[in-house]
Image (cartoon, rainbow, N blue to C red):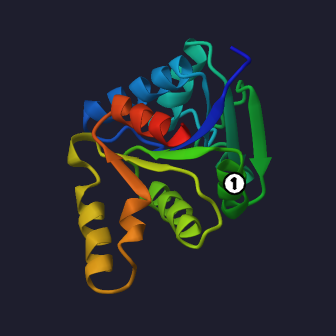
Amino acid sequence: MSDFTKSVCVYCGSRDGVSPAYANAAEDLGALLVKSQWRLVYGAGDVGLMGRVARTVQAAGGVTFGVIPTHLLDWEVGKRDLDSFVITETMHERKKVMLMNADAVVVLPGGAGSLDEFFEALTWRQLGLHQKPIVLLNVDGYWDPLLAMMKQIVDQGFADDDILAFVDIVPDAKGAIAALAARFD
């Protein structure tokens, strides 16, 4: 598929995690991105949930745009058979290129890197640097502690309520696609 209508940046783990539900969500999201004719923008890794999303998009004939810094080419097994494969010098440049080439963000379960990417996208939204939808795919309640922390930040006066409104929380890939479709219209 060469035509796509939107680009969705997916932040997620470079590992699968312990629950099979995480891998299933990554694969479901990849398939639904293609069905929606949306391009995948992601960290260009071929491991963990990153690799699962990308391989699923490719298998379904979708379009992929990967961005990886030089120091992670071996560690994350840079997936060089993507439609677009960008190598950056730094992690900061990677995050900027990914977000600037996307119309929205979806965050699957992941570790510190996924949190870093999520909070940078959220902070940029809070500061008015973009208006892109941000969707947190809360598979089996994985992000519940994060959501509690975000509420704590608001309750303790370190952010306004609008920071919570910038993020759509969904339980599965279908919910993510529905949330994005509503925001894209």
Residue 141, relative to residue 26: is it above or below?
Answer: below
Q: Residues within 10 Å of mark 1 (few under 14, many from 20)?
A: many
Residue 90 figure quarter: bottom right
Q: Residue at x 31, y 34 (%)?
A: 172
| As drawn, 126 above or below 89 | below
The amino acid beneath tag 1 is Arg
Left or right of 110: which side holds 42? right
- The number of discs equals 1
Residue drawn at (28%, 85%) of the image: 156
Q: Is residue 4 above or below residue 134?
A: above
| Foreground residue among 18 and 41 | 41
98 displayed left or right of 106: right
* One can see residue 145 in this view: yes
Q: Whole-percent x and y of residue 2?
A: 74, 17
Query: Element under label 1?
Result: helix
Measured along the vertical axis of the image, is residue 34 above or below residue 101?
above
- The image quadrant of residue 125 is bottom right
Quadrant assignment for the N terminus:
top right
**Residue 153 position within the rendered picture, expressed as x and y whole percent measured from the top left:** 32, 78
| Residue 65 coordinates in the image, percent (x, y) | 69, 34
Q: What's the residue at 27%, 32% (across, down)? A: 21
Q: Which residue in the structure is indicated by mark 1?
A: 94
Specify whether residue 48 is in view. Answer: no
Residue situated in front as seen by the camera: 110 or 4 = 4
Outermost residue toward the bottom in this view: 157
Viewer-nearest residue: 111 or 125: 125
- At x 65%, y 42%, the residue is 74
Q: Residue furthest front?
A: 185
